[in-house]
Image (cartoon, rainbow, N blue to C red):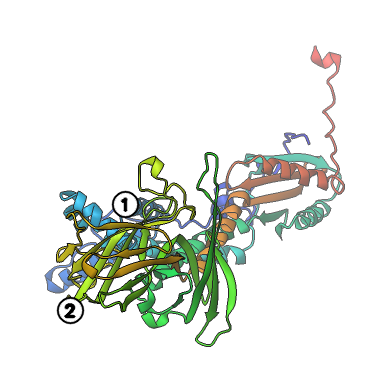
Amino acid sequence: MAKTDSTASPQTREPRPDEEDDGTAGAPLSTAPTEEGGQAMPGSFGGVRAPGFLGALAWSAREAIGWVRWFWRQLTSMRVALILLFLLSLATIPGSLVPQTSVDAVKAQGWKDQHKTLAPIYDKLGLFHVYSSVWFSAIYILLFVSLIGCIVPRTWQFVGQLRSRPPGAPRHLTRMPAHATWHTDAEPEQVLAAAAKVLRARRFRTEARSEAVAAEKGYLREAGNLLFHISLIVLLVAFASGQLWKSEGGKLIVEGDGFSNTLTQYDDFKSGSLFDPEDLAPFGFRLDGFTGTYERTGPQKGTPREYAAHVTYWDGSDGAERKTDIKVNEPLETAGSKVYLIGHGYSPIVTVRDGKGDIAYRGAVGALPLDSNVTETTVLKVPDYRDKNGNKDQLGFKGFFVPTLDLRTGTMFSQFPGLDNPVLVLTAYHGSLGIDSGMPQNVYQLDLSKMKQFKDKDGSAFKSMLKAGDTMTLPDGAGTLKFEGIKNWATFQVSHQPGNETALAGAAAALLGLAGSLFIQRRRIWVRAVEGEDGRTVVELAGLGRSESARLPEELADIAVALQDAAPLVTPADPAEPSEGARA
């Protein structure tokens, strides 16, 4: 398509009333709020103050309203919204680096004990509870308000653009970034009708004017932009609801025991500020067994190959029982909650008899793993005990359970997580366990401040190494402890996080809106057809987009080619050559 210059071009004629200035034609291509005219920097908004008290009062009111409007314009600008979004991302960094009380209170307290100088400063700054701190909440709420303030006016502007028609053709189409001009013998009305048909076939919205056809396309770009920002608000709402109404707790369950989703059943529990214990969904499950197999050779020795908790669960108080397996990253989903498998270990089963031969305790011994090979520290407390004379006393046992003991290594630590050579090593104490004071105690810790260790006949500390079936006999007829066997235990995390589905939908919508705003182009095309001085029709074609792109000239060229059937190109006749005499 050749571009030709012609003195008959519409560039030289007077502008028509329905034509637009070159700048006006491209002004409404974006829904970004335009800056209001007038004073943009803070200053005096009250204008001239009239004399007297009433004048001062009126001036003060105008001044206050002016400042409020100025602050609102700043807050709802896209620039401030981006700054707040950046600040929110920065504010999450301390929550990742500093131990959070809501996540791990023990770890947070340990950090405070190790950093006596920084701990008070961090505490005043709220760095141990970042996501519930005042400054994080302020950023969060301001971002929420800013996004809403940005979206509402843009939405109304976008609706107005959808209802409006494409603007008229500019006076000088050849000044557009992409344009073409040619001559044809077709009538102007025929050219314009063909142009409207071609543009509508390409899904352009068209508007026929007296000498031109205006067309516009790419409205979904702004729709995608609005969808992206609305999705951010959805994500913020989902995150806030999840933090306010969430609940999360841990439970250690020995094989054969069960769990009901009530607050008293949890070993540890944390929740959002608006959580109500009555919101806990009624469900439960029982640990039927555990399967754990491990790699036995090579560099990955001890790595789990099969790691699954076999459970029976039910919904509601009278729900039908169903069996399933809970694996790592494969939680049980029931009643709106997820049950995750966190860890696994072994519980030695013991029977303790007092000095009279009566059973004082029978059951599992509390144990916590110390390493990846499941070397466990064990603690057993026996408060209901009588010595050989029938006097009330209390017993305490402390030691280790080793699934695979190998004395050739010179250490008491387990060499493999499987039960290849299980051994229970215990020392025994008697005295006061400190549980009668009414103060809560950790079941995995033994307070030795008021207890005495049993001694052998030679005065050394009494201790014993037991295999399954062995019995420890306490000195002076104080009783016995028999190692009956071993059961598996598993730790579970029960998590109820409302808003996850909403957050997922918001994230998907945000990606969809972002793709639309990046890959869809808003563009306008004009086709003008007028009769030239030589009697032929001059066709002008021009396009304008929001940003420079190679796609617009290509699209314009395709439209020009499509118009060739209705408006074929005709080369204008050159003026007659002067004669030789005339040259002379």
Residue under the image location 28 percent in, 61 percent down: 398
Along the horizontal axis of the image, is 234 left or right of 413?
Answer: right
SS at mark 1?
helix
Q: Is residue 433 above or below residue 209?
A: below
* Dot 1 or dot 2, earlier in sequence: 1
- The residue indicated by pointer 2 is 391
Along the horizontal axis of the image, is 98 left or right of 337?
Answer: left
In depth, the one of 102 and 523 nearer the eye is 102
Along the horizontal axis of the image, is 370 left or right of 383?
Answer: right
Classify 10 Å Cα crowding around label 2: few (below 14), some (14-19), many (20 and above).
Answer: few
Give the image quarter of residue 561: top right
Assign the C terminus to one quadrant of the image: top right
Residue under the image location 76 percent in, 49 percent down: 529
In depth, the one of 449 and 274 nearer the eye is 449
The disc labelled 1 sits on which kind of residue?
A: Pro
SS at mark 2?
loop
Assign the N terminus to one quadrant of the image: top right
- The residue indicated by pointer 1 is 94
